[in-house]
Image (spheres, grey):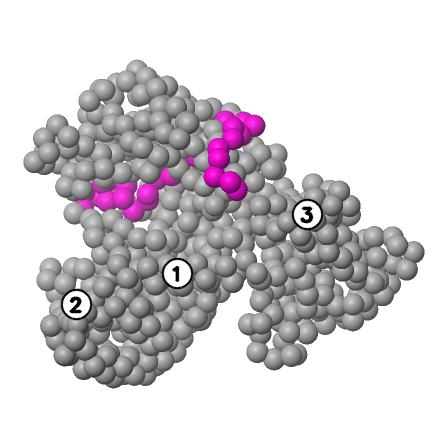
């Protein structure tokens, strides 16, 4: 079965069973606390958490995702940075029995997989949440023998939330037995064994809980189902390939790389796999408008680019080696995701630009590493984690390269220390992101002019939110925002596309309030008092005990907008100029996005 057939087969199966087919949402999520969309359920979080009433009871999708948590594992049989996830959801409709029945029917009747090779895992109970006896009973009643049902802890069989808080629950994972041959563990060889016998293909999450900011779990108002299939893994099982990389999603890219190299796939599999994976991820990120930088999403993109370039060097690829492989990505995915085809020239341009920068930094990094090794020749023969991370941070020098060169000189590298330094850096970056207002930290902007424009756009965002609630209704809730000196982006809950008339009304109302020259008043008070005073606060777990409240009001004290916010703002709305909406679009189920500018 080809990849395009599997996508269609999955969506057709669930659509016939009453599920609404949703398109993939963006890799850049509406939730500002997440860098990337990393699971199919992210666009449905408002429904799963009970914050927004779902317009349907059942949904399904094929979602593009990106994760870098397991980047060190990329290059094995089935780990990837970019991947697709097939998913089906029930919002207060069917629960465990329905989810298990659908999964078995699809795998056995539609895909013709052998039922006797299906093994499952269930939650064994932990932290006050009981063992999932119900799931065990259902699996057995459906013909899965008890010896093929394994119990695991919260680490393996309790899913979510995607961020620090949110909907979550125990899960039941479906594994496929590739060989039917147990390893030396004998009867203990089963799901989660690292011998390579089993591959996880489907995760059924029974969402019963909400994880709160203090780490406790509370029951959700409705029981929901959230499932996810690793598309590449299932495809590998169906195409009977030794790994995901020999499926029709990767093999044309790998063969294109091999044509350019004097190395062979059989002897350099890991580099071929990493390169193919990273080229695919880079193509999708650039197609979504992400550009290389030293912060947030741009930082991840730059890391992927430099890792790719390192492996291109290992494979001795020629100048402009990325042109052919990126074209293969657009050929493979262009029909499903047209953006990778239309942004082909942008993707190549990013590769060209970063390769030049990396060449220079690589030379400087090599010099710095040589100096470091020389200075330690007569002392300890260990490169500390901090030193290795400094090379990575300052020169884009991959840990792998530091290890390789150090080993040649008889040195070791403290990998654990590197990971600790990297995690510390990530925590600092995350903390910095939390101090931002709507995606822009004033201190990060280089010029006074940029800071002034971003400040105006931030006040305009408050006007926009108030206008949306007045025109569309009070059910509108902020789901995220991002501000640059050039434009604002505002994500909000709403079940449908806005009409041209509604967009014009919203735009006109904001411009009316700008013309009225309203005063922007700032006050400080406790969070509780702010909420009592009517200030909007949609991200409750993020606020400190004392907060700033910004009210936009006329001389008589009539308030148009009142929000808890960390600023900064202009003093009067007349400073803003003319407000113009340039785009309105969907970014997920029940979530719309507006982009606007000030002229």
In the rendered image, residue 54, in percent from the top left (x then y), is placed at 58, 34
In the rendered image, residue 458, in percent from the top left (x then y), is placed at 68, 63
Residue found farthest to the front:
379
- Residue at left offset 34%, top offset 46%: 4
Q: What residue does disc 3 label?
A: 527
Q: Is residue 435 above or below residue 146?
A: below
Along the polypeptide, which appears first: circle 1 or circle 2? 2
State if disc 2 and disc 1 touch (CB < 8 Å): no
For the residue carrying disc 1, how many other residues have a C-alpha within 10 Å: few (<14), some (14-19), or many (20+)?
Answer: few
Image quadrant holding the N terminus, namely top left
Q: Is residue 357 above or below residue 570?
A: below
C-alpha distance separating marks 1 and 2: 22 Å
Q: What residue does disc 2 label?
A: 412
- Residue at left offset 23%, top offset 20%: 146
Can I make out residue 103 in this image?
no
State if disc 1 and disc 3 touch (CB < 8 Å): no
The residue segment tinted magenta is 213-241
Along the polypeptide, which appears first: circle 3 or circle 1? 1
Check if residue 440 falls in the magenta segment: no
Displayed quadrant of residue 378: bottom left
Circle on res. 424: 1
Q: Is residue 14 above or below residue 36?
A: above
Q: Nearer the viewer, residue 418 or 220?
A: 418
Q: Nearer the viewer, residue 45 or 261?
A: 45
């Amino acid at each position: 079965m080809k990849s395009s057939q599997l996508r269609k087969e999955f969506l057709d199966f669930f659509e016939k069973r009453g599920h609404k087919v949703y398109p993939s949402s963006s890799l850049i999520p509406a939730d500002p606390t997440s860098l990337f969309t990393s699971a199919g359920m992210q666009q449905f979080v408002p429904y799963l958490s009970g914050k927004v009433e779902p317009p349907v009871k059942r949904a399904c999708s094929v979602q593009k995702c990106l994760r870098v948590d397991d980047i060190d594992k990329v290059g094995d049989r089935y780990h990837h940075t970019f991947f697709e996830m097939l998913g089906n959801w029930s919002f207060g409709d069917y629960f465990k029995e329905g989810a298990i029945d659908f999964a078995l029917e699809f795998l056995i009747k539609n895909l013709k997989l052998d039922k006797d090779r299906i093994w499952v895992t269930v939650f064994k109970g932990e932290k006050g949440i009981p063992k999932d006896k119900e799931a065990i009973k259902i699996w057995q009643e459906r013909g899965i023998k008890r010896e093929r049902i394994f119990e695991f802890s919260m680490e393996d069989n309790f899913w979510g939330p995607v961020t620090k808080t949110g909907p979550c629950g125990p899960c039941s994972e479906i594994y496929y037995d590739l060989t039917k041959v147990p390893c030396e563990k004998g009867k203990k060889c089963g799901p989660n064994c690292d011998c390579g016998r089993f591959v996880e293909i489907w995760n059924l999450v029974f969402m019963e809980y909400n994880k709160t900011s203090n780490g406790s779990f509370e029951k959700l108002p409705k029981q929901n189902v959230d499932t996810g299939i690793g598309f590449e893994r299932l495809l590998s099982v169906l195409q009977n390939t030794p790994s995901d990389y020999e499926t029709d999603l990767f093999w044309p890219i790998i063969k294109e790389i091999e044509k350019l190299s004097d190395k062979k796939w059989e002897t350099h599999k890991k580099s071929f796999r990493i390169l193919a994976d990273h080229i695919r991820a880079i193509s999708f990120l650039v197609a979504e408008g992400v550009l290389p930088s030293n912060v947030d999403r741009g930082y991840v993109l730059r890391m992927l680019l430099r890792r790719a370039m390192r492996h291109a060097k290992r494979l001795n690829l020629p100048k402009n080696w990325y042109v052919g492989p990126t074209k293969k990505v657009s050929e493979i995915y262009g029909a499903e995701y047209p953006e990778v085809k239309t942004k082909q020239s942008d993707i190549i341009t990013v590769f060209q630009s970063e390769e030049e920068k990396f060449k220079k930094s690589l030379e400087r990094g090599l010099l710095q590493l040589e100096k470091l090794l020389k200075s330690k020749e007569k002392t300890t023969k260990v490169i500390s984690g901090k030193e290795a991370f400094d090379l990575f941070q300052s020169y884009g020098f991959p840990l792998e390269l530091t290890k390789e060169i150090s080993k040649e000189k008889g040195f070791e590298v403290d990998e654990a220390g590197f990971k600790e330094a990297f995690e510390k850096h990530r925590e600092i970056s995350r903390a910095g992101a939390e101090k931002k207002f709507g995606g822009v930290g004033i201190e990060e902007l280089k010029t006074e002019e940029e800071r002034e424009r971003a400040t105006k756009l931030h006040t305009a965002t408050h006007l926009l939110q108030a206008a949306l609630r007045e025109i569309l209704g009070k059910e509108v809730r902020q789901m995220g925002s991002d501000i640059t000196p050039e434009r604002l982006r505002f994500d909000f809950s709403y079940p449908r596309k806005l009409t041209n008339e509604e967009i014009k009304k919203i735009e006109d109302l904001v411009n009316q309030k700008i013309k009225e020259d309203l005063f922007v008043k700032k006050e400080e008070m406790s969070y509780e008092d702010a909420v009592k005073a009517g200030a909007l606060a949609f991200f409750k777990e993020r606020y400190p005990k004392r907060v700033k409240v910004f009210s936009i009001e006329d001389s008589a004290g009539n308030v148009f907008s009142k929000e808890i916010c960390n600023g900064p703002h202009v003093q009067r709305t007349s400073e803003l100029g003319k407000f113009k909406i340039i785009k309105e679009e969907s970014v997920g189920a029940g979530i719309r996005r507006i982009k606007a500018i000030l002229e």
